[in-house]
Amino acid sequence: MTDPDPFGRAIYDHARGEREAPLVQRDGEETLEHPIEAFYFGDFSPDSEDSRWIESRLSGPLLDMGAGAGRDALYFQERFETVAIEVSDALVETMRERGVADARLADMFALPEFFEHDRFASALAIGTQLGLAGSMQGLRQFLGDLAFVTMPGASALLDCYDPDREGTTDLLGYRADPTPDLAARVMYFEYEDETGDILLFRLFGPDRLREATVGTDWGVTEIRYVGNDYHYIAALEKR
């Protein structure tokens, strides 16, 4: 029996025009319909200021981590080699059917198991999946693994929610933390008759991300808030 994958199944069905039920985020009795079309099936727009900023910091070969339905990979693969990874078979199949040239089943938190040393010139993780590192130690481990699979001078763009910004506390599943610049988010997905595993996201503010880079090959060069007052993208460079 395969593990439940309501998230991947819902996106796969949506891509094929076969989705008849909502994808629901749940925290106990609190629920929220996940906006699949808006989050995963729009185009990467090179005309927006935020998109131009993102594109200016990426080069190939690019590793797109947690690539979803392949929105960003479809754009960047026309410009340089792009490898898109996901932990869901349904999402990998969705990307392939949508035209992603190199979509692979791989875990962004176990990168050395899937890729050789110095494989990529840049890396991208858009979707706040960085929070699944689970802890400051997990974040440091991820940054070390990312350094292993990237070239000297590589760049990375990673996004997260800033727990110290107004609005973050309204997120479904938000959990406060007494430590400054840290919080958590606990939730799971439901689709049709399937319930996914409980997901624990750690919310790292920019200062905590900078702290996590100490002792790694990475340094944070810029923090850019996008979309609202609490969602940010961090630009990192490999020393």
Image: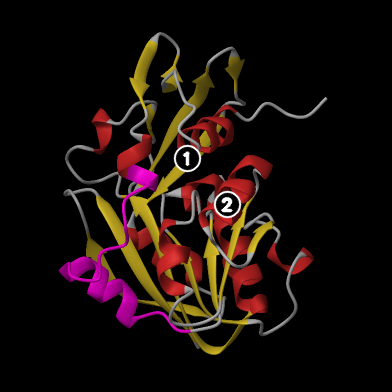
Q: Residue at x 66, y 77 (%)?
A: 149
Looking at the picture, tell me which residue is in the foreground, 198 or 103.
Answer: 103
- Residue 185 x/y as whole percent: 43, 33
* Residue placed under numbered mark 2 in the picture: 97
State which quarter of the image contains the N terminus.
Answer: top right
Question: Which of pointers 2 and 1 lies earlier in the amino acid sequence?
Answer: 1
Q: Is residue 186 magenta?
A: no
Against 209, is 164 above or below?
above
The numbered mark at residue 15 is: 1
Q: Amino acid at mark 1?
A: Ala
Residue at mark 2 to residue at mark 1: CA–CA distance = 9 Å
Look at the image and give the residue range highlighted in magenta: 39-59
Q: Residues within 10 Å of mark 2 (few under 14, many from 20)?
A: some
> In this image, 142 relative to 79: left or right?
right
Q: Are marks 2 and 1 in contact (CB under 8 Å)?
A: yes
> Which quarter of the figure has residue 3?
top right
Residue at far top of view = 29
Q: Residue at x 59, y 18 (%)?
A: 195
Looking at the picture, tell me which residue is in the foreground, 217 or 194.
Answer: 194
Against 7, is 146 above or below?
below
- Residue 200 x/y as whole percent: 53, 35
Q: Residues within 10 Å of mark 1 (few under 14, many from 20)?
A: many
Q: Classify mark 1: helix, strand or loop.
A: helix
Q: Is residue 40 magenta?
A: yes
Q: How is the image coloured?
A: secondary structure
Looking at the picture, tell me which residue is in the foreground, 105 or 211.
Answer: 105
> In this image, 151 relative to 20: left or right?
right
